[in-house]
Image (spheres, rainbow, N blue to C red):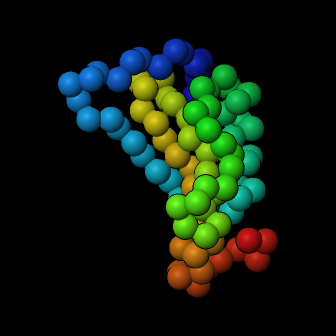
Amino acid sequence: MGGVTTPRPQDPSQPPVFVCFDVPSREVVDERARWLSEQGAPIESGPAEYDYTPGYYAVLFYDPDGIKPELLHRPTYWASLGDEPKDS
């Protein structure tokens, strides 16, 4: 992520851009959130557990273009793949 810049404001005439990446553990969410903070990335919320589905754990942040990525861990998703990490 090179230098961090201030996010550009969202153009109100365009729909918001949102990207979600599902990761295999809460530890990955926490580690990436720490890294993002160290780089100066604006964190919108988290890392925290949210009430959307059981175990939904995420961090939301902004990239330099104002896009709001989310790093998400959902143990139910990984269990459905048969790849649930043992620490979840």
- Residue 81, above or below 9: below
Q: In this view, does 41 lie to the left or right of 63?
A: right
Task: Choose top left, top right, bottom left or bottom right for residue 15.
Answer: top left
Q: In which quarter of the image is residue 53?
A: bottom right
Give how far across and how far down residue 13 sits, in percent: 21, 25
Residue 24 in view of the camera: no
What residue is rendered at 61% in x and 45% in y? 59
Q: Is residue 19 left or right of residue 81?
A: left
Horizontal side of 44 relative to 7 (left or right) equals: right
Quarter of the rendering occupied by the N terminus: top right
Q: Position of residue 72 (x, y in %)?
A: 57, 55
Q: In this view, does 72 lie above or below 15?
A: below
Q: Can residue 75 be seen in this view?
A: yes
Q: Would you identify the image quadrant in which residue 73 lies?
A: bottom right
Q: Is residue 78 left or right of residue 25?
A: left
Residue pushed farthest right? 87
Q: Nearer the viewer, residue 50 or 85?
A: 50
Q: In this view, does 86 lie above or below 33?
A: below
Near-viewer residue (54 or 2): 54
- Is 13 or 77 nearer to us in this picture? 13
Task: Name the residue at the front extreme.
Answer: 51
Q: Nearer the viewer, residue 62 or 28?
A: 62
Q: Position of residue 77 (x, y in %)?
A: 54, 73
- Which quadrant of the rendered structure holds the C terminus? bottom right
Query: What's the residue at 65%, 77% (across, down)?
Result: 84
Residue shown at 66% from the left, 43% from the top: 46
Q: What residue sits 71% from the left and 36% below the top?
A: 35
